[in-house]
Image (cartoon, rainbow, N blue to C red):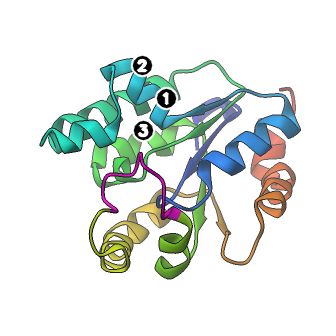
Amino acid sequence: MTAGGACRILLIGMMGSGKSTIGRLLSEATGWPYVDNDDLVRRISGTTARQLVADGDEAAMREIESAALVAAVGMHAPVILGIAAGTILDRANRDRLRHGGIVAWLTASPAILATRAVGAEHRPWLDGDIGAWFSEAAAEREPLFGEVADITIDIGRSSAGEAVVLLREHPAIREACADA
């Protein structure tokens, strides 16, 4: 967690975990701004992550996602941030997350995530075998998410509204955000 207890809530998890939905609902409930990674990527690069991957430049997309994370953790608190799932793969990004705020991991089974992620045009990895992609990506990323998470919420068992209540009432958030 961030030094000094800054009220910066970083929502992490696989695509389909509800980071954007929960981030917006939490923003409405608290009055704090919500900033989504996809918006930061567009601001930095002038394009979308999907377009970068379509152009054959996944490495550039990962660099831009890292730059978006740097920008996000530098934002004035209080703020709620939706973080790109792939940023967890980079050790330096995991360090940024650990020190950038309160990290809330929204988790669910790969099957639930795959169902929720279908149809989102901005998600470039879902053009093939979605179930296989989620199983492989979850196996690689879940230990890394667990490594940095201060809070874990199983969104397979909680609605978005319930997740917002759990976040607002969590002692770490209440303490860090008491003056926000």
Kindly report the distance in space between the C-alpha atoms of the residues bearing marks 3 and 2. Answer: 20 Å
- Element class at badge 1: helix
The answer to whether 113 appears left or right of 26 in the picture is left
Q: Which residue is mark 2?
A: 43
How busy is the neighbourhood of tag 1: few (under 14 within 10 Å), some, or many (20 plus)?
Answer: some
- The magenta segment is 117-126
- x and y, in percent, of residue 142 in the image: 42, 70
- x and y, in percent, of residue 60 in the image: 18, 34
Q: Which mark is residue 125?
A: none
Kindly report the distance in space between the C-alpha atoms of the residues bearing marks 3 and 1. Answer: 19 Å
The answer to whether 172 appears left or right of 152 in the picture is right
Dot in front, 3 or 2 = 2
The amino acid sitting under disc 1 is: Asp
Kindly report the distance in space between the C-alpha atoms of the residues bearing marks 2 and 1. Answer: 6 Å
The amino acid sitting under disc 2 is: Arg
Q: Which residue is mark 3?
A: 96
Q: Is residue 103 visible?
A: no
- Element class at badge 2: helix
Q: Is residue 72 visible?
A: yes
The first of marks 3 and 1 along the sequence is 1
The residue shown at (78%, 67%) is 159
Residue 124 lies in the magenta stretch? yes
Q: Answer yes or no: do the residues labelled 3 and 1 have beta carbons within 8 Å?
A: no
- Give the overall secondary structure of the magenta segment: loop
Residue 52 lies in the magenta stretch? no
Dot in front, 3 or 1 = 1
The first of marks 3 and 2 along the sequence is 2
- Element class at badge 3: helix
